[in-house]
């Protein structure tokens, strides 16, 4: 019982720390309306689950898409409006090369190095923000997760008391750094916090905003719906400089 109590205390303290470390809104941002779609977008993390959906749906919308990937063989899509650049988001020169001429950036960075400290998400995002400033790219839409900042405790008890503290503590801690880098930047940004991701079909309707999630049960959403929501934020100021949650 003592070990269980200590573990529960650790899990709750970790979630409280994630709440403090991630982005926290100080006030509701002023609501904005739509504006013209970007014509050229850069997708970072294009070979991941959300990233592949971003590439697919951006091409369907008629965008000229640039994908920055470490291994081009993992991106099987071929299209005349798709440019694949081999590089590493941790290499500033790679990011600078990919950023030239872009109007918006969609960041769906992820990795599976869960069990040791890492700064892949935060360092990669810092390079993205710096390259955006250098090239005058205006809009960044960045995927993180429910469960951090002012959405802490909103992935349900299974995540709060088991998955995050046991499997994902380093990963989520780096996500808090990632959010801070985005929120403290001078670019136009939207942080998108999905619930637990799956590979389901796009439903086209999602719950969105600051109140998404629940402290008891896990809310879920497909990567396809997250990608659609992220793409919509490249042409809308509704959630500009805020961090909406997204779930079914």
Image (spheres, grey):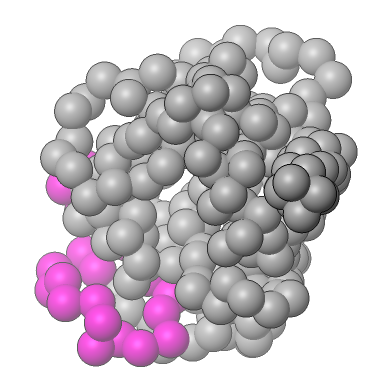
Could you say where residue 95 lies in the image, as x and y percent from the top left? 58, 76
Residue at image x 80%, y 14%? 27
Could you say where residue 167 lies in the image, as x and y percent from the top left? 57, 63
**Residue 239 appears anywhere in the view:** no
**Residue 218 appears anywhere in the view:** yes
Q: In terms of image quadrants, where is residue 183? A: top right
- Badge count: 0
Could you say where residue 175 lies in the image, as x and y percent from the top left? 67, 55
Could you say where residue 90 lies in the image, as x and y percent from the top left? 64, 81
Residue at image x 46%, y 26%? 217
In the rendered image, residue 77 lying in the magenta stretch gets the answer yes
* Residue 60 sits above or below residue 207 on the image: below
Q: Is residue 85 left or right of residue 128?
A: left
Residue nearest the observer in this picture, 91 or 223? 223
In the rendered image, residue 40 lying in the magenta stretch gets the answer no
* Placement of the C terminus among the 4 image quadrants: top left
Residue nearest the observer in this picture, 13 or 93? 13
Residue at image x 16%, y 77%? 76
**Of all residues shown, which one is farthest toward the front?**
1
Q: In terms of image quadrants, where is residue 151? A: top right
Task: Please give the range of residues in magenta.
Answer: 58-82
Residue at image x 70%, y 65%? 170
Q: Is residue 110 left or right of residue 188?
A: left
């Amino acid at each position: 019982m003592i070990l269980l109590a200590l573990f529960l205390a650790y899990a709750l303290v970790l979630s409280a720390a994630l709440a403090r470390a991630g982005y926290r809104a100080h006030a509701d941002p002023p609501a904005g309306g739509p504006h013209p779609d970007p014509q050229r977008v850069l997708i970072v993390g294009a070979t991941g689950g959300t990233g592949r959906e971003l590439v697919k749906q951006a091409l369907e919308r008629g965008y000229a898409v640039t994908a920055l990937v470490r291994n081009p063989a993992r991106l099987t899509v071929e299209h005349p409006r798709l440019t694949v650049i081999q590089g590493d988001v941790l290499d500033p020169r790679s990011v600078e090369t990919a950023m030239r001429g872009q109007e918006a950036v969609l960041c769906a960075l992820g990795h599976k190095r869960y069990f040791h400290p890492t700064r892949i998400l935060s360092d990669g995002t810092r390079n993205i923000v710096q390259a955006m400033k250098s090239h005058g790219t205006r809009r960044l839409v960045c995927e993180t997760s429910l469960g951090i900042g002012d959405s802490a405790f909103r992935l349900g008890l299974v995540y709060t008391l088991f998955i995050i503290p046991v499997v994902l503590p380093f990963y989520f801690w780096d996500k808090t750094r990632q959010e801070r880098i985005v929120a403290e930047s001078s670019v136009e940004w939207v942080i998108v916090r999905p619930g637990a991701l799956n590979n389901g079909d796009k439903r086209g309707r999602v719950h969105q905003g600051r109140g998404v999630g629940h402290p008891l049960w896990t809310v879920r959403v497909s990567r396809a719906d997250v990608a659609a929501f992220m793409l919509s934020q490249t042409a809308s100021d509704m959630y500009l400089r805020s961090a909406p949650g997204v779930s079914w």
